[in-house]
Amino acid sequence: MFRTFTFGLSAVLLATAGLAQAAPTEYVIESNHTYPSFTAPHMGISFWRGKFNKTSGSVMLDTAAATGSVDIMIDASTVDFGHEKMNEHARSEDFFNAAEYPTITYSGEISFDGATPVAVDGELTMLGVSKPVPLKINSFKCIEHPMLKVEVCGADATASFDRTDFGMDYGASSGTGVELQIQVEALKKP
């Protein structure tokens, strides 16, 4: 059921990836347009999808040097399955234990193909446990934001991991694999 996780994502969420420019440039995660989401087995009979509603962090990019980094924070208490009883259980000690571990983090180094970010070699920290969780960047694009008139970059990233690696063992007999899907947008820092 919520033997999930995410985020990052992964994580995180996240999340997350890339952005353009010719010198080291910092981009700030736009929380209203960033959603680390995940899919995980529920009692072995279906797959539930959830997301985290509050994400923050930054991405540093230097496309000329083909280097970059990601630092993401996810508020574990904002886990959302669209089902309040599930949300409550997911926040409990059985899963994310949001009272004791309120923040999920993801930090890593961005890999490039030419000037395009294609992956993140990062570490997810959840429930006080840190493990490597690499992200694949499936798409990446930067444009001038039509309303804010500042550069905005967006990416779609995916990853997978086993939640028991982080000590999330509740209901493990029903399956423990988690698939992350992370949509992220970040604004160039003024």
Image (spheres, rainbow, N blue to C red):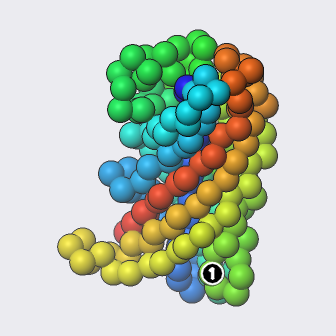
Tell me residue 4's x, y (percent). Answer: 60, 32
Q: Looking at the image, which residue is at 70% across and 48% down? A: 160
Query: Is any atom of residue 30 visible in this view?
Result: yes
Name the residue type under label 1.
Thr
The residue furthest top is: 93
Badge 1: few (under 14), some or many (20 or more) residues near its Cα, within 10 Å? some
Residue 143, compared with residue 180, is above or below; it is below
Query: Is any atom of residue 56 visible in this view?
Result: no
Tell me residue 21's x, y (percent). Answer: 53, 82
165 on left or right of 137: right
The residue furthest front is: 45
Kindly identify which residue carries mark 1: 116
Quadrant holding the N terminus: top right
Name the one closer to the observer, 182 or 101. Answer: 182
Tell me residue 142's x, y (percent). Answer: 44, 78
Q: Looking at the image, which residue is at 46% across and 59% down? A: 184
Q: Secondary structure at mark 1?
A: strand
Residue 51, compared with residue 109, is above or below; it is above
Residue 63, compared with residue 159, is above or below; it is below
Name the one closer to the observer, 101 or 158. Answer: 158
Residue 5, compared with residue 169, is above or below; it is below
Q: Looking at the image, which residue is at 44% across and 49% down? A: 35
User: Image quarter for residue 42?
Assistant: top right
44 on left or right of 20: right
